[in-house]
Image: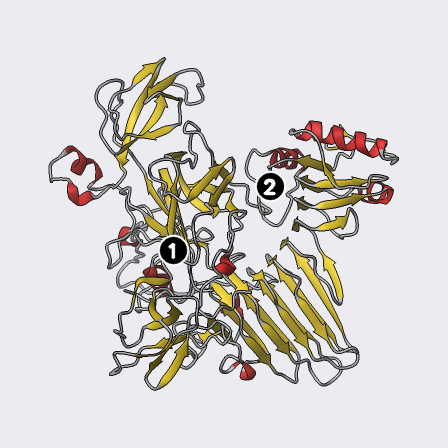
């Protein structure tokens, strides 16, 4: 169809019937308030020098 | 400048994420050179070639072939002796055009099948041949494809091809083998009889349709939408349109014509509490363009209470209409920001007859200010159009070819295309090889190599162009901001070259109050560009907000000035290039809540049309950027650039 010697479309090609009809856009709610952060540091501790015995 | 990269995700017709699920993925571009491609992202195989693209005979039997934008015209020999599953996936309808000749060899032993999946492509002159053996079935699935012409699907006489078409846009019906149209297809400009096409929830646009008693009796329970169609009903001898404009009147006209033409209209149908004659069909004018309808259209209002969705696309976007007059809010209209050479009509923007598409043109149209109703993220843009991409006419703000011819300077690693300055073939010699402008052989692209910086003319009047975007992405431009200056303007002098938005003092749905500028009344939600008139009057409780200079450039503003202080930490109204099908961006500091988008090395915002976008989210540098941030904002403007003589 478009195999032309000079690499271009044929001269005089009528494109007046071709058109853009509209632009439609879609939206969603914008992201809000999601922070990347360290929330806290939680530590565990026990009494020093105490031996735990597990009872089975 | 960064080289454009393929996207980070491609899907198969069955919905699989190809890059994650396939062991073998090969990339193709029509603008790569023949010699250097290896099927990888940054060195794709050339697919626009009249001989087998290098390496395709050795492609794995189960593999994905990913096609960039552009017209792909290669002959593929996909030989294999075992079961084959091949995925042909592109960048989207109208962007990736497949005119391929594919020879998919079938397995030689019984019990094996061959399967092909097409997705996100336009089919034009596709020839898919499967050499088969007795009792072996072949399956071809089309999903989200556009059919400009009937694909030639052929096989040996002893085997059968089954084709399935889903969510596709069909301008020519398929033929050959066993074809099944599944639900949700959009038919455009075809001739058929209602009921002869299987499936439900189709749209028929500008079609010539025969209606007989069986159409009414057997298919009344299928959902169909008919837009701008001509009907030949019962004893009628000609195809004629329905008289009327609204869906209600058109339904009445259709029913009356059926009765007059000797048909019996079935009993009224009650659907979700709504009782109508032929209540699952809807007849409209100008409510569907290229298979796409929009939020609030008559089609959409029919869909909502019935919980259905017509046609190939589920997106019901907000329409930015193309209009002739200058006081339709949020529209695209002929103003000083439009180039000459475009003809505006209602819902139509076309190229004037005096524009010669064999010459380079950049035609552009621009929208008014679009208020998004609060801060929103942009999820999709659809641009229904039928511009002739096959003749190199595209909506594309990224030039595929650099404007100037290369002037006999060749850079290593860059691609170049040979064309002719007149209508005759032309050729050059580079690095010992001859390259011609002729599209019939497509030996017209070469890649610069180190140490060979020039070419010599061989015949005719050649012109050599550097290729800017070998992946042929097609983008539009938009500018979007979160805020505009807060001043409420009720009197005073307007600023030249600035856009102003009309706001009501309390009710943005008010339709009685207005601003008068340059003889035109603008109501709430409308906007205008100030050029040679700097005064306005107001009627009612209404005011203006100044948005931005049409040529906004932050560098103009001195530190400490009002403009500088407002915009310095804000998203700025600068044009950026966006792929309509992918409205993502990067934010400053890679933080989704930054006020402003990230800028690339060229200083422009990084959105999907920017060459750095896919490279960054793919982590080509070793550091990956987030891929889940959509372009967001409150006020937006859109610009369409229509360009000619793109590679074909």
First reached walking from the N terminus: tag 1 or tag 2 = 2
* Horizontal relation, residue B584 to residue B289: left or right: left
The residue drawn where x is 11% and y is 40% is B559
Q: Nearer the viewer, mark 1 or mark 2?
A: 2
Q: Residues within 10 Å of mark 2 (few under 14, many from 20)?
A: many
Q: Position of residue B578 (x, y in %)?
A: 39, 52
Q: What's the residue at 32%, 51% (across, down)?
A: A36
Above or below residue B518? Residue B425 is below
Figure quadrant of the N terminus of chain A: bottom right
Q: CA distance from mark 1 to mark 2?
A: 28 Å
Q: Quadrant of residue B261?
A: top right
Q: Examine the image and state in which quarter residue B368 appears.
A: top left
Above or below residue B350? Residue B164 is below
From this view, report whether residue B315 is shown above or below residue B297: below
| Chain of the residue where label 1 is placed in the rendered structure | B
Residue matched to label 2: B288
Pointers 1 and 2 within a single chain: yes
Pointer 1: what residue?
B608
Q: In the displayed structure, does residue B114 sit left or right of residue B629?
A: right
Name the residue: 41% across, 19% down: B507
Please state the horizontal and vertical placement of residue B401, each as a whole percent of the image. 36, 63
| Residue toward you, A47 or B303 | B303
Could you tell me which chain the residue with mark 2 belongs to? B
Q: Is residue B500 left or right of residue B584?
A: left
Whether B588 is drawn above or below B426: the answer is above
The residue lying at 71 percent from left, 73 percent from top is B154
Front-lying residue, A3 or B625? A3
| Element assignment for label 2 | loop
- Label 1 CA crowd tier, 10 Å (few <14, some 14–19, many 20+): many
Could you say which is closer to the camera, residue A36 or residue B48?
A: B48
């Amino acid at each position: 169809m478009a195999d032309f010697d000079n690499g271009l479309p044929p001269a005089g090609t009528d494109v007046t019937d071709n058109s853009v009809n509209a632009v439609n856009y879609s939206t969603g709610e914008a992201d809000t308030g999601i922070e990347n952060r360290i929330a806290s540091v939680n530590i565990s501790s026990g009494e020093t020098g105490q031996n735990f015995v597990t009872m089975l | 400048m960064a080289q454009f990269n393929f996207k980070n995700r491609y899907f198969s017709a069955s919905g699989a994420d190809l890059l994650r699920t396939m062991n073998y993925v090969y990339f193709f571009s029509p603008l790569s050179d023949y010699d250097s491609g290896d099927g990888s992202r940054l060195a794709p195989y050339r697919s626009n070639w009249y001989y087998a693209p290098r390496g395709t005979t050795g492609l794995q039997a189960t593999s994905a072939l990913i096609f960039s934008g552009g017209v792909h015209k290669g002959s593929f020999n996909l030989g294999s002796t075992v079961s084959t599953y091949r995925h042909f996936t592109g960048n989207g309808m109208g962007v990736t055009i497949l005119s391929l000749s594919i020879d998919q060899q079938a397995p030689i032993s019984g019990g094996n099948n061959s399967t092909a999946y097409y997705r996100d492509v336009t089919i034009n002159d596709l020839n898919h041949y499967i050499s088969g053996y007795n009792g072996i079935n072949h399956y071809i699935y089309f999903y989200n494809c556009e059919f400009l012409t009937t694909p030639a699907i052929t096989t040996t006489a002893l085997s059968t091809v089954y084709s399935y078409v889903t969510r596709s846009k069909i301008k020519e019906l398929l033929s050959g083998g066993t074809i099944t149209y599944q639900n949700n297809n959009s038919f455009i400009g075809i001739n058929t009889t209602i009921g002869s096409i299987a499936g439900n929830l189709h749209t028929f646009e500008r079609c010539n349709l025969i209606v007989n008693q069986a159409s009414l009796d057997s298919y009344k329970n299928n959902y169909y939408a008919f837009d701008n169609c001509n009907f030949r009903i019962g004893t009628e001898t000609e195809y004629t349109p329905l008289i009327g404009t609204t869906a209600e009147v058109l339904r009445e006209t259709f029913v009356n014509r059926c009765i007059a033409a000797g048909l019996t209209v079935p009993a009224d149908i009650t659907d979700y509490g709504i009782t109508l004659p032929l209540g699952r069909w809807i007849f409209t004018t100008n409510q569907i363009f290229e298979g796409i309808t929009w939020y609030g259209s008559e089609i959409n209002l029919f869909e909502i209470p019935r919980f259905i969705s017509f046609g190939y696309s589920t997106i019901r976007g907000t329409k930015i209409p193309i209009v002739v007059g200058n006081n339709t809010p949020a529209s695209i209209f002929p103003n000083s920001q439009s180039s000459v050479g475009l003809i505006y009509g209602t819902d139509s923007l076309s190229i004037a007859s005096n524009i010669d598409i064999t010459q380079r043109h950049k035609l552009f149209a621009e929208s008014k200010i679009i208020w998004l109703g609060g801060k929103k993220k942009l999820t999709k843009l659809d641009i229904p159009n039928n511009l002739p991409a096959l003749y190199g006419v595209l909506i594309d703000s990224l030039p595929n070819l650099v404007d100037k011819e290369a002037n006999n300077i060749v850079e290593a690693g860059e691609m170049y295309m040979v064309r002719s300055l007149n209508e005759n073939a032309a050729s050059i010699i580079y690095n010992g090889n001859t390259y011609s402008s002729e599209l019939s052989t497509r030996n017209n692209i070469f890649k610069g190599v180190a140490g060979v910086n020039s070419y010599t003319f061989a015949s005719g009047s050649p012109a050599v162009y550097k290729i800017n975007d070998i992946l042929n992405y097609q983008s539009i431009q938009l500018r979007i901001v979160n805020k505009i200056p807060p001043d409420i303007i009720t009197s005073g002098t307007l600023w030249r070259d600035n856009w102003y938005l009309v706001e009501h003092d309390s009710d943005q749905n008010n339709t009685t109050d207005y601003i008068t500028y340059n003889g035109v009344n603008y109501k709430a939600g409308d906007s205008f560009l100030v050029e040679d008139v700097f005064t306005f009057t107001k009627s009612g409780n209404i005011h203006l907000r100044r948005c931005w200079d049409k040529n906004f450039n932050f560098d103009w503003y001195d530190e400490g000035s009002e403009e500088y202080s407002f915009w310095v930490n804000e998203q700025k109204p600068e044009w950026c290039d966006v792929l309509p099908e992918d409205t993502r961006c990067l934010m400053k500091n890679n933080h989704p809540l930054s006020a402003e988008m990230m800028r690339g090395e060229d200083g422009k915002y990084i959105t999907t049309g920017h060459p750095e976008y896919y490279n960054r989210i793919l982590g080509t540098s070793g550091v990956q950027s987030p891929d889940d941030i959509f372009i967001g904002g409150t006020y937006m403007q859109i610009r369409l650039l229509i360009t000619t003589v793109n590679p074909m």
